[in-house]
Image (cartoon, rainbow, N blue to C red):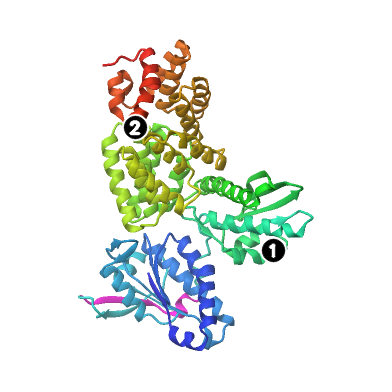
Amino acid sequence: MAADVAGYSRLIGADEGGTLQALRAIRAELIDPMIAAHNGRLVKTTGDGLLVEFSSVVDALRCATEVQAGMTERNTTVPDDRRVEFRIGINVGDVVVEDGDIFGDGVNVAARLEGLAEPGGICVSARVQEDAAGKLDLAFEDMGEHTLKNIARPVRVYTLRPEAVTDLRTTMVPHVAPRLSIVVLPFTNLSNDPEQQYFADGITEDLTTDLSRIANSFVISRNTAFTYRNKSVDTKEIGRELGVRYVLEGSVRRSGNQVRVNAQLIDAETDAHLWAERFDGNTSDLFALQDEVTRRIAIALNLELLTAEAARPAEHPDALDYLLRARAIRAKPPSRENFAEVIDLCERAIALYRQSVATQSFLATNLTARVLDNMTDTAAADLVRAEKLAGQALAASPRNPFAHYAKAQVLRAQGQYDDAIPEYETVLELNRNSVTAYVHIGQCKLLTGSIGKVIPLVEQAIRLSPGDPEIGLFYYRFGQVHLLQSRTEEAIAWLHRARNQAPAYSTFHSYLAAAYVLNGEMERAAAELAEARRLSADDRYSTIARLRAAQYWGVPKIRALFEATYFAGLRKAGVPEE
């Protein structure tokens, strides 16, 4: 879908500042929400225009008609000479993806069709009109064949004139709030000191920024959200006014050197409270407290929003439905069955929308994760597919944190730990709330020789996400480091917690077996080793040689620690050398 502003130069010449302000408001309040609601991807903006990619003709047409009908509504009170009106062109065709941009005749035709449209109207190719037939009740007019600039063959053009879309906002296309759409209302200052308002406002602003990092999310800007300050709140009305599914509200109360922050997530459609949490802290470092509170809320909400969205029934699931359901299942404890279901849902999403960077990245991540977790019988094929998907995602979106995370996971699974570290660091630069990136950098640091840096990294992950679904992995890293440094009792305590959190991980059982042996508890060691062998996807625990060959054990000084503790424990537990 290509769109631009009719008469843009005239509008700029008459009132540059007012026109640019109006366009920013239109983008934030109408166009961006509609793109998100209909599964579009904003490829780029070009001054007065924009280019959007969709996974289906129906999505593109619904978005276009929503935008045009919405603009008609907005312009009813605007003088004729100041009205902003869009022309829109829609085409179906193959595209070439490069650095997040798209090229090819498919794109060029859409741009030429936009030039043929009337202000407030839409022009489409014959293929679009055919694909929409029987699915959307639209009054297309046949404009005949047109020879378009730099297009080799004539294109048959159909149009929706402005008057044909005027009433569509309330008739054909009822407004639907985008998935994962949310507004963070200004947090209320309950302290007696009005000067503490800045702290409450900081929480609100930082949360708005952090929630915007959630994949596929749509977050209302802080400027719009702050217009609701000191107003009585009707959640359903706010949801309708802003076109969001969720509302986050909260309060800040300070007493002496203690601060309490309360937050609650509300479903704007039903007014139901979905989640609530309280955070207490000391004001000795207000900025650090503000930072930690906002990040913990954002991380918790990521999981809550996914759960809520995945639970919404979908009569005809689209690519995003499948992806959201996959992400919700991935939040459960890992198992072979859960990985298989996640990957199946991702494959369905890919089949519907092959260019989705989010789905490519998530599928690559999970193919790699089940290899790393020893929960697949097709490890080599999984890694080949994951590497290809991660490469496609990065080529299409070089600054996407999820694509970099997928690449980092592939490199880690391939034993390229030095190369994986900068990829994980890039993830954290782009999305500071990627908790698992902290943990995996910890493993990479360990295997490249920096064992002293592991525990602080994992502590940061636990501090940010104490209820994380991957918390068992965090505990395991603690236990592993303690075991390698011969702090056996501490290792057992952490590995026991890891095993209880995620009993399907064979690795957790094997490390616990080694720790129990080194602590003289032979019966417990035997039981854990048997369980590790039962859960393993291969025979790595049958001999020390096979286990040693199954993965990389670090630089020489780290390998020596594994030999003196982990391998020594397994030998005593009865694992033969060859």
Residue 96, position as x, y percentages in the image: 27, 63
Residue under numbered circle 2: 554
Residue 190, position as x, y percentages in the image: 75, 54
The answer to whether one can see residue 57 in this image is yes
Q: Tag 2: Cα neighbours inside 10 Å, few (<14), some, or many (≥20)?
A: many
- In the image, what residue type sits under mark 2? Gly
Q: Residue at x 36, y 57 (%)?
A: 398
Q: Is residue 165 magenta?
A: yes
Extent of the magenta region: 153-167
The answer to whether one can see residue 410 in this image is no
Residue 88, position as x, y percentages in the image: 40, 75
- Near-viewer residue (241 or 264): 264
Q: CA distance from mark 2 to mark 1?
A: 55 Å
Residue 114, position as x, y percentages in the image: 36, 77
Labels 2 and 1: the sequence-earlier one: 1
Q: Is residue 560 left or right of residue 258?
A: left
**In the rendered image, which quarter is residue 370 located in?**
top left
Q: Is residue 470 above or below residue 308?
A: above
- Near-viewer residue (369 or 163): 369
In the image, which disc is placed on residue 330?
Answer: none
In the image, which disc is placed on residue 229?
Answer: 1
Tell me the quarter of the image containing the N terminus. Answer: bottom left
- In the image, what residue type sits under mark 1? Arg
Q: Is residue 413 above or below residue 172?
A: above
Count all numbered tags in the image, as a single digit.
2
Q: Residue at x 48, y 66 (%)?
A: 32
Q: Residue furthest front?
A: 557
Q: Tag 1: Cα neighbours inside 10 Å, few (<14), some, or many (≥20)?
A: few
